[in-house]
Image: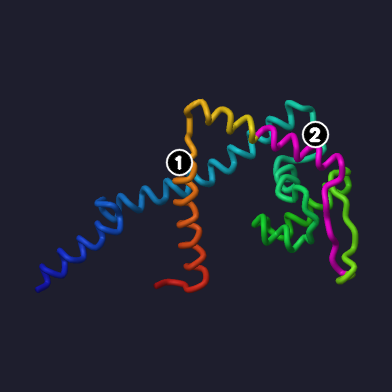
């Protein structure tokens, strides 16, 4: 009976890990996590390179991506944090710098005098368009065969499933 349970457990483990052992799957999972982090840093480096190339020194790569996330919207800091997954203390500092350097305009909310509404200034809109141009260039390169829409969709689907898994871990803990 114990042998049957062991075989069943092995089959269950294999089914959940696409026919590789648990140790190998763990190695693949850790490699995935490292790659996600490395890709994020690399993309920030790409944005920094674009800012340097254009001689833009009064905004950081992270700040320019915050501007891109705001886009044409007007929102509160809380909304930006929720929508962009930026850390609260970091986003507050970055928004302060963006206001100081003329990329953002802010005004007190009429409904809650403790909070501010933010929107891009003309200078901020110009930088947002620059970042959009960078992304469009990337898409143009992808169209030359590096990635297809199906490839990107598959990556997005997988990362969304991973995000849901982690969200469930946070909400419900160990199963």
Circle 2 residues within 10 Å: few <14, some 14–19, many ≥20: few
Which quarter of the picture shows residue 92? bottom right
Comparing labels 2 and 1, the label whose residue is closer to the camera: 1
- Asked if labels 1 and 2 touch by Cβ distance under 8 angstroms, the answer is no
The residue wearing badge 1 is: 150
Q: Nearer the viewer, residue 138 or 28?
A: 138
Q: Quadrant of the N terminus?
A: bottom left
Residue depicted at x 40% and y 51%? 29
- Mark 1 surroundings: few (<14), some (14-19) or many (≥20) residues within 10 A: few
x%, y% of residue 39? Answer: 54, 41
Residue 134 percent coordinates (x, y): 67, 33
Q: Residue at x 17, y 66 (%)?
A: 8
Q: Which mark is residue 166?
A: none
User: Quadrant of the image for the C terminus?
Assistant: bottom left
Q: Which residues are magenta?
A: 114-134
Distance from label 2 to label 1 (Cα)?
A: 37 Å
- Whether residue 140 appears in magenta in the rendering, the answer is no
Residue 44 image offset from top left, x and y in percent:
64, 39
Residue 55, above or below 117: above
| Left or right: residue 87 compared with residue 28 | right
Task: State the predominant SS element of the stretch in magenta.
Answer: helix
* In the image, residue 1 above or below residue 40: below
Decide which of tag 2 and tag 1 comes sooner along the chain.
2
Q: Which residue is mark 2?
A: 57
Q: Secondary structure at mark 2?
A: loop
Residue at x 16%, y 66% (from the top left corner): 6
Residue 24's spot in the image, x, y percent? 30, 49
Q: Is residue 36 left or right of residue 127?
A: left
> In the image, what residue occupies the spot 88% across and 47% down?
100
Looking at the image, residue 71 lies above or below residue 15: above
Residue 118 falls inside the magenta stretch? yes
């Amino acid at each position: 009976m114990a042998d049957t349970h062991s075989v069943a457990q092995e089959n269950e483990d294999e089914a959940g890990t696409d026919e590789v052992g648990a140790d190998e799957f763990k190695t693949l999972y850790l490699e995935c996590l490292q790659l996600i982090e490395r890709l994020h840093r690399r993309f920030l480096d790409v944005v920094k390179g674009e800012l340097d190339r254009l001689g833009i020194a009064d905004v950081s790569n992270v700040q320019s991506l915050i501007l891109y996330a705001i886009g044409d919207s007007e929102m509160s800091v809380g909304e930006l944090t929720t929508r962009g997954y930026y850390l609260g203390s970091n986003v507050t500092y970055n928004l302060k710098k963006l206001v100081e350097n003329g990329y953002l305009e802010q005004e007190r909310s009429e409904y809650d005098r403790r909070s501010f509404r933010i929107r891009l200034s003309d200078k901020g809109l110009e930088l947002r368009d620059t970042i959009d141009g960078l992304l469009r260039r990337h898409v143009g390169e992808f169209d030359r065969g590096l990635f297809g829409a199906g490839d990107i969709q598959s990556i997005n689907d997988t990362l969304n499933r991973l995000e849901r898994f982690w969200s469930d871990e946070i909400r419900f803990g160990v199963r």
